[in-house]
Image (tube, helix red, strand yellow):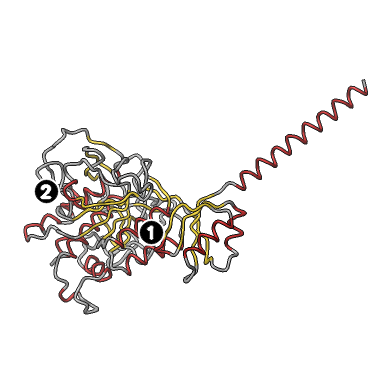
Amino acid sequence: MKKKFSILLVAGVLIGLIFSLVGVVLISQAKSEPARKIVVFKTGVDEATRESLINKAGGVKIKDLKLIEGKAVLLSPQAEKALVRQAGVLRIDDDVSVEALIKEGSWKVNRVPPRPAQVLPWGVDRIDAELVWPSGNTANPIKVGIIDTGISNTHPDLLANVKGGINTINPRKNWNDDNGHGSHVAGIVAALNNDIGVIGVGPEIDLYAIKVLGAGGSGYLSDVIEGIQWAIAHNMQVINMSLGTVSDIKSFHDAVTAAKTAGIVVVAAAGNSGSPTDGNSTVIYPAAYPEAIAVSATDQNNVIASWSSRGPEVDLAAPGVGIYSTYKGTDYATLSGTSMAAPHVAGSAALVLNTPVGSNDVNANGKWDPDEVQTKLQATAKDLGDAGLDTLYGWGLVNAFNAVQ
């Protein structure tokens, strides 16, 4: 009996040891799983050396990010530790997830005839964009890059205004929108004045589809940075980013700064994390960067949406609740979010850029600069909330008509 008990005891100990060893192996493997990182190199490190450093560390390059002297790379924790110690490496950032900023539960696809009669969306009406068009200013040919899920390449209310684009997720594929978010944003900016569907803030703006988010409405920061890089290279005058992340990543800030330095007006959605009851209302990135125009969302009563992020980073407010616009394919949809607010400001910026700079030319260089456009939009906004600048509406509700006077 004692012998049998001893055998069982030994067997139990052995089984326990085996399970422990398996657990250690599994934990070790989990810790060694490669993750997406952004490796930024010091100025002066040549391309061959950069590639060599990554290869020696055991990394796998995903793409070049020349705008920030970096590369997106797959790195195991061990490889990251080895690489960050190299003399030519400035830093390694996380290649975080970035999301489209739709208010959860607001998604409503409107099943309408293929070519419904045109209506003036309440948001475009509220910012008085339609009062600008009779002067002949429809923002043609101002170039606006929609950094998003793409733009529908079949929509009759958009396609004539789409002049090009890129898919940074997979350059072998086109920029067509397989989600709907980017097409909705694009329609707010520049849906055609063609008697069907809706009409955008600047109905003859040249749209560029910069697809950085996938069918699920999310993507990686490195793809967004490549999109900004493309926008600079192709001379965009305005970029709209109705997307964001809660993570403050230096590489993201550097890319946004580079866009503004290149003369691009950067417009970004403030985020949908607002909650007046518990104080959770942080403006997310890139809107929180000072180089971007951060936009909060208002409803038809000119009141900030309860879910709209708010804070000292907010520069302007715009309509963002129950916004009817174009969608993927040939559909239309009603959506809510600061994603919808930002393109009202982007379109307004395009209308301003299509006017003579005149006395607004602070630095006397004969053209509109991003700061001059932002100052004009802020100075002519409808003051809401507390007098002057406040954390809910910034300088107030954007007004396109006032801004072009």
The mark found on residue 68 in the picture is none
Near mark 1 (Cα within 10 A), the count class, few <14, some 14-19 or many ≥20, is: many
Q: As drawn, which residue projects farthest toward the right? A: 2
- Up the image or down, 387 lies above or below 317; here it is below
Secondary structure found at label 2: loop
> x, y (%) of residue 88?
54, 67
Snapshot quadrant of residue 267: bottom left
> x, y (%) of residue 266?
30, 62
Near mark 2 (Cα within 10 A), the count class, few <14, some 14-19 or many ≥20, is: some
> x, y (%) of residue 136?
7, 60
Residue at (13%, 67%) from the top-left corner?
Answer: 405
Q: Amino acid at mark 1?
A: Pro
Instruction: In this rendered view, identify the residue nearer to me: 112 or 296.
Output: 112
Quadrant where the image shows the N terminus: top right
Residue that carries the numbered disc 2 in the rendered image: 193
The mark found on residue 286 in the picture is 1
Classify residue 242 as left or right of residue 192: right
Snapshot quadrant of residue 134: bottom left
> x, y (%) of residue 291?
35, 66
Sequence-first disc among 2 and 1? 2
